[in-house]
């Protein structure tokens, strides 16, 4: 009985680990219905080079963002732009039109939904897969004809493509940059790929527990066999 009880406890703890760990590690949501608000920012990086945007004001449908491009933490270029939140048309603070930014796209598109990515260029969304981010694995969408990945829940760019508005403002390309820092909640993380990714680290622990249970059961079985043998011997001696 003691052996079986210990087995159940060990198996219960293993099961609880896979069920409870995702809940404990999930970041707290901001609770805001809109992620784009004053103070929200995203930073993309590649080696020592980084691009960062921060929302410094919102006036109706227009958001004012500060863009900065840096190398080794030294800002080489910056600009304040105004972006229409609904259609992503982007302007310099003096009114110069820059085009449509791809820093975010419409969230939660359906498979093959046509999305206008840049001026007069629309593509079918591929809604599948996930990528690892600073907030865990996130569901994504992308387009076959252009590079880049966007977060499915928020529409935020996760891995950069060239940005029409960014280039028009005189910034160098940030294609291939990945999100390295943000205060925006990207939404629920995907735990299946994270568990699969963690399996090489968990397998030694699981293997140890399996071997431990096996050895424990074998020891208990041998103990029972000895007890049965001794019981038979006592009966024979009593005759």
Image (cartoon, rainbow, N blue to C red):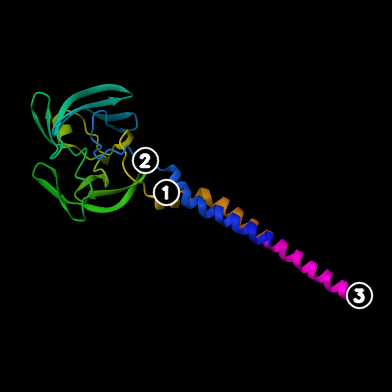
Contact, CB < 8 Å: mark 1 with mark 3? no
Between the C-alphas of marks 2 and 3, the distance is: 72 Å
Q: Is residue 185 above or below residue 221?
A: above
- State which region is magenta: 217-237
The residue nearer to you, when weighing 5 against 141, is 5
Q: In this rendering, does residue 13 appear at all?
A: yes
The residue nearer to you, when weighing 12 against 75, is 12
Check disc 2 and report the residue beneath it.
135
Residue 31: mark: none
Looking at the rendered structure, the number of numbered marks drawn on it comes to 3
Q: In this rendering, does residue 213 appear at all?
A: no
Q: Secondary structure at mark 2?
A: loop
Residue at (47, 47) in percent of width and height: 21
Quadrant of image for the N terminus = bottom right
Q: Is residue 97 above or below residue 108?
A: above
Q: Is residue 150 above or below residue 171?
A: below
Q: Earlier in the sequence, mark 2 or mark 1?
A: 2
Q: Report the mark closest to the observer, 1 or 3.
A: 3
Residue 79 sits inside the magenta stretch: no
Q: Earlier in the sequence, mark 2 or mark 3?
A: 2
Check disc 3 and report the residue beneath it.
238
Check disc 1 and report the residue beneath it.
194
């Amino acid at each position: 009985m003691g052996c079986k009880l210990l087995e159940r406890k060990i198996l219960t703890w293993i099961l609880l680990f896979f069920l409870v760990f995702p809940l404990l590690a999930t970041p707290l949501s901001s609770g805001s219905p809109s992620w784009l608000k004053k103070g929200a920012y995203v930073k993309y990086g590649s080696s020592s080079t980084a691009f960062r945007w921060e929302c410094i004001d919102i006036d109706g449908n227009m958001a004012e963002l500060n863009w900065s491009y840096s190398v080794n933490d030294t800002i080489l270029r910056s600009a304040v732009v105004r972006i229409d939140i609904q259609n992503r048309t982007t302007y310099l603070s003096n009114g110069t039109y820059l085009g449509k930014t791809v820093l975010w796209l419409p969230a939660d598109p359906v498979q093959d939904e046509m999305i206008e990515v840049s001026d007069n260029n629309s593509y079918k969304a591929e809604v599948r897969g996930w990528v690892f981010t600073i907030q865990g694995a996130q569901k994504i969408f992308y387009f076959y004809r252009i590079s880049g990945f966007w977060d499915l829940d928020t529409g935020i760019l996760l891995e950069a493509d060239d940005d029409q508005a960014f280039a028009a403002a005189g910034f160098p390309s940030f294609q291939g940059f990945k999100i390295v820092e943000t205060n925006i909640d990207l939404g629920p993380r995907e735990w299946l790929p994270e568990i699969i990714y963690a399996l090489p680290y968990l397998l030694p622990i699981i293997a140890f527990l399996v071997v431990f249970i096996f050895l424990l059961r074998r020891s208990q079985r041998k103990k029972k066999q000895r007890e049965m043998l001794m019981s038979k011997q006592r009966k024979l001696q009593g005759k």
